[in-house]
Image (cartoon, helix red, strand yellow):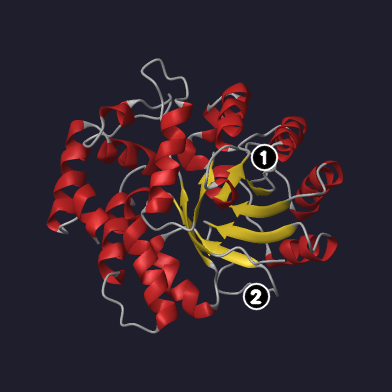
């Protein structure tokens, strides 16, 4: 089994003015990120407003994404609390030959490791021919994976539980399993993570830092002196001052107004926040054009 590794963007969803999903432009956005240096993308992660987008729209996108030249480079997020809907959505994706998924435990309810193990067990009993990257983000789900929980899941499903996206950052410095991918959720952890043996990153801000992140990744493996890591981290720190989805949509709307469309209760940055964001990025000599040229 080939280990999943590299720079992955938690790609944004592009919406129409009526807030329906623009399937064509969402796929174009994801493919552009791969062209700019990402090894792949995570479709329908939290950055893609997944829990706010209807299942029917997600399925429409999967049908079109199955025709993409980069089909094999996409991780499919489920973004569904319902076990049944998660399984049904995965079955649809599997019928279109997608087999790599990013799955977070359900939000809202309180539970512990045993219940999480049961949740993924039920999924894999129904959809055994898949690979799952666990999504560890306590801020969103209310649950934080323990190393013990992951060890149990990997032992129970060694061919299916293949990695973790660690956005709670309690795992990436300690977890070291053979043929298991560990992806911190921020560019701030990229270089340190690689030094510790991590597989890369899966991160929201790779929507705008794809080339810079890829260069840091490539320079690490080639043994080249790092020339962009500090700037990459500084850019991430600017975005971290705001809700990432709000900040990214606001920033990208300066290039294309369609990114102003965002699903409530999410919002764009207010005028003061927008001004501060753009000025801070300008002070770093970071713009959409400069990031493409990085």
Separation (CA) of disc 2 from disc 1: 25 Å
- The number of callouts visible is 2
Front residue of 140 and 98: 98
Q: Earlier in the sequence, mark 2 or mark 1?
A: 1
Question: Relative to 162, does residue 88 appear above or below in the rendering?
Answer: above
Tell us which disc is closer to us: 2 or 1.
2
Residue 270 location (% of width, % of height) = 24, 32
Question: Which structural element holds mark 2?
Answer: loop
Q: Quadrant of the N terminus?
A: bottom right
Judge left or right: residue 257 versus residue 112: left
Residue 29 location (% of width, % of height) = 40, 40
- Asked if disc 2 and disc 1 are in contact, CB closer than 8 Å, the reply is no
Find residue 193 and name its label: none
Q: Give the residue at mark 1.
A: 106
Residue 237 location (% of width, % of height) = 30, 58
* Quadrant of the image occupied by residue 231: bottom left
Front residue of 259 and 72: 72
Q: Is residue 85 visible?
A: yes
Judge left or right: residue 169 versus residue 162: left
Q: Residue at x 30, y 63 (%)?
A: 232
Find residue 176 and name its label: 2
* Quadrant of the image occupied by residue 78: top right
Q: Is residue 137 visible?
A: no
Q: Residue at x 77, y 48 (%)?
A: 120
Front residue of 11 and 274: 11
Question: Which structural element holds mark 1?
Answer: loop
Mark 1: few/some/many CA within 10 Å (<14, 14-19, 20+): some
Mark 2: few/some/many CA within 10 Å (<14, 14-19, 20+): some
């Amino acid at each position: 089994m080939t280990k999943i590794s590299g720079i992955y963007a938690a790609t944004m969803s592009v919406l129409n003015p009526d807030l329906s999903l623009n399937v064509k432009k969402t796929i174009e956005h994801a493919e552009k990120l791969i062209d700019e240096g990402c090894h792949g993308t995570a479709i329908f992660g939290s950055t893609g407003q997944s829990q706010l987008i209807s299942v029917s729209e997600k399925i429409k996108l999967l049908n079109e994404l199955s025709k993409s030249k980069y089909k094999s480079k996409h991780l499919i997020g489920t973004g569904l609390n319902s076990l049944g809907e998660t399984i049904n959505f995965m079955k649809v994706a599997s019928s279109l030959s997608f087999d790599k998924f990013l799955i977070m435990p359900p939000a809202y309810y309180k539970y512990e490791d045993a219940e999480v193990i049961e949740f993924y067990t039920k999924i894999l009993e129904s959809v055994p021919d898949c690979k799952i990257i666990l999504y560890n983000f306590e801020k969103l789900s209310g649950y934080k994976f323990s190393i013990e929980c992951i060890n149990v899941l990997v032992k129970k499903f060694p061919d299916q539980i293949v990695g973790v996206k660690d956005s709670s950052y309690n795992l990436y410095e300690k977890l070291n399993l053979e043929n298991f991918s560990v992806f911190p959720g921020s560019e701030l952890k990229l270089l340190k993570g690689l030094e510790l043996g991590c597989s890369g990153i899966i991160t929201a801000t790779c929507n705008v830092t794809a080339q810079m992140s890829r260069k840091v990744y490539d320079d690490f493996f080639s043994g080249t002196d790092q020339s962009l890591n500090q700037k990459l981290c500084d850019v991430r720190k600017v975005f971290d001052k705001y809700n990432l989805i709000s900040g990214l949509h606001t920033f990208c709307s300066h290039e294309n107004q369609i990114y102003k469309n965002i699903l409530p209760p999410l919002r764009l940055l207010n005028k003061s926040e927008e001004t501060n964001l753009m000025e801070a990025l300008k002070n770093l000599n970071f713009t959409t054009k400069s990031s493409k040229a990085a």
